[in-house]
Amino acid sequence: MGPWLVPLVLALFTFGTADFVVAGILRELAESLGTSEAAAGQLVTVYSIVYAVSAPLAAVATTRVPRRKLAGYAMLLFIAGNVVAAMAPTYEVLLVSRVVSAIAAAAVTPMCFGAAGTLPPEGQRGKALGMLSGGIMLAQLLGVPLGTWFGGMWGWQASFWMCVVLGVAVLVTMFALLPDLELPPAMGLRDRLAPVTRGPVLRGLSAMMLLSAGSMMMMTYIAPISDAASSVGTNGIAVLFIAAGLAGLVATQVGGTASDKLGPLRTVATGAGILVAAMVGLTVSVAWGSAPLWVLIGLVMVMAFGIGMLNPPLAVWLLSRAGSSGNEVMALNASVMYLGTSLGGVLGGTLLALSGPGALPVLAVVETLLVVLLVVTAERRSAGTGEDAPAAGAADEPAAAPSRAH
């Protein structure tokens, strides 16, 4: 791993912080702009939806733009969007600034994943992608609490000024540390999108969406689940979130390294097994109703560890089948992660209202098994048809990503 990885991780940390920091300053922001907390919460939703839609469009539209030039323009746009947000006099202006910031982030993120999946030697690509996933996890563990603290100390505008500073840091480090990245080979739009339309890649993307939906569902509704299992109070919930963040941060590194050493498929199976075990434990705890807090902390940490282990090998697997369309596939990967996040909130809320908190871990088990089924069947299909398949005998070896950086 070289210094080029620093701006990539910092970029993912910055974009994740900018997305979710609104949640920590919701009340102050709503009061200042004269709107409801529900309307203020839509600032997160709009950012996520715009990001999900923009990522694949930006990937296709910027195919022939030099990577560092693309990163420079996009980061300037991201910085400008957050400057406007910090100075926004009305809710409407703030909403537009969120759209601008999301478009900028969507243009850079696929490039980050493509570079991390192609610049390192083959035996370290999973580790690099794991570190990028760790940047996203660190945003929730450190970036959002820090932004919330700034907002509480100096007003909600300070949270967006923090994002401006982070954006400047990304821009500077990208030009200082990121090497020139080769453009993908010139080819028509149909050829570039061909891998995306094939069964293996579509199943891999579906697996990533299901994983995102299940993980967000469990984290969003961890409070009612914990209350049903052990009547956990606010302080206990805070401890659970911190424990989950730490476990997830470690797991992304373990998952990336394991993907390099064991291969993506074995790593996915291992992470899925860990996650299912945690879900079974949570289901039993909810049925018990008197589980000690330390038991819940342990189960939540195991759950977060299983989730964190699954992200890097899925990204490695997708890149190994993307060929010269790695940028487009990674853009869609980012999109389905955000769509899965939204889907998880809706499914979890509906199931919670209909069947209670005990049903959520059960649904998470079903989603996890579907993730494994999708990846396994995608691997068999690609091996059987020869489409986007790795070299013979490499089906369960560390996957080789494309030879060019995107």
Image (tube, rainbow, N blue to C red):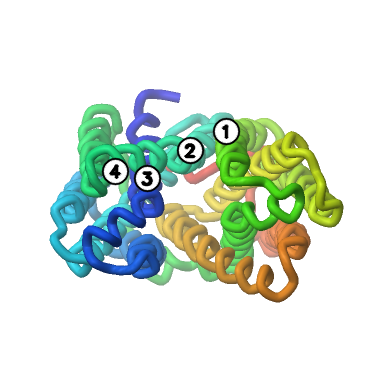
Q: Which residue is mark 1?
A: 246
What is the CA distance from the residue labelled 3 to the residue labelled 4?
13 Å
Which amino acid, by three-letter code, is at mark 4? Gly
Q: Is residue 110 left or right of residue 289?
A: left
Above or below, comparing residue 378 to residue 182 in the picture: below
Which label number is shown at residue 151?
4
Q: Secondary structure at mark 2?
A: helix
Q: Secondary structure at mark 3?
A: helix
Q: Which residue is mark 2?
A: 141
Mark 1 vs mark 4: in front = 4
Query: Mark 2 touching mark 1, by CB under 8 A?
Result: yes
Q: Which residue is mark 3?
A: 17
Above or below, comparing residue 326 to residue 267 in the picture: below
What is the CA distance from the residue labelled 2 to the residue labelled 3?
9 Å
Q: Earlier in the sequence, mark 1 or mark 3?
A: 3
Q: Secondary structure at mark 4?
A: helix
Q: Residue at 34% of width from left, 38% of height from top?
A: 149
Q: Residue at 49% of width from left, 45% of height from top?
A: 402
Q: In the rendering, at what x and y percent does residue 105 appear?
A: 31, 53
Q: Secondary structure at mark 1?
A: helix
Q: Earlier in the sequence, mark 2 or mark 3?
A: 3
Q: Is residue 226 left or right of residue 184?
A: right
Crowdedness of circle 4 by 10 Å Cα count: few (<14), some, many (20+)? many
Crowdedness of circle 3 by 10 Å Cα count: few (<14), some, many (20+)? many
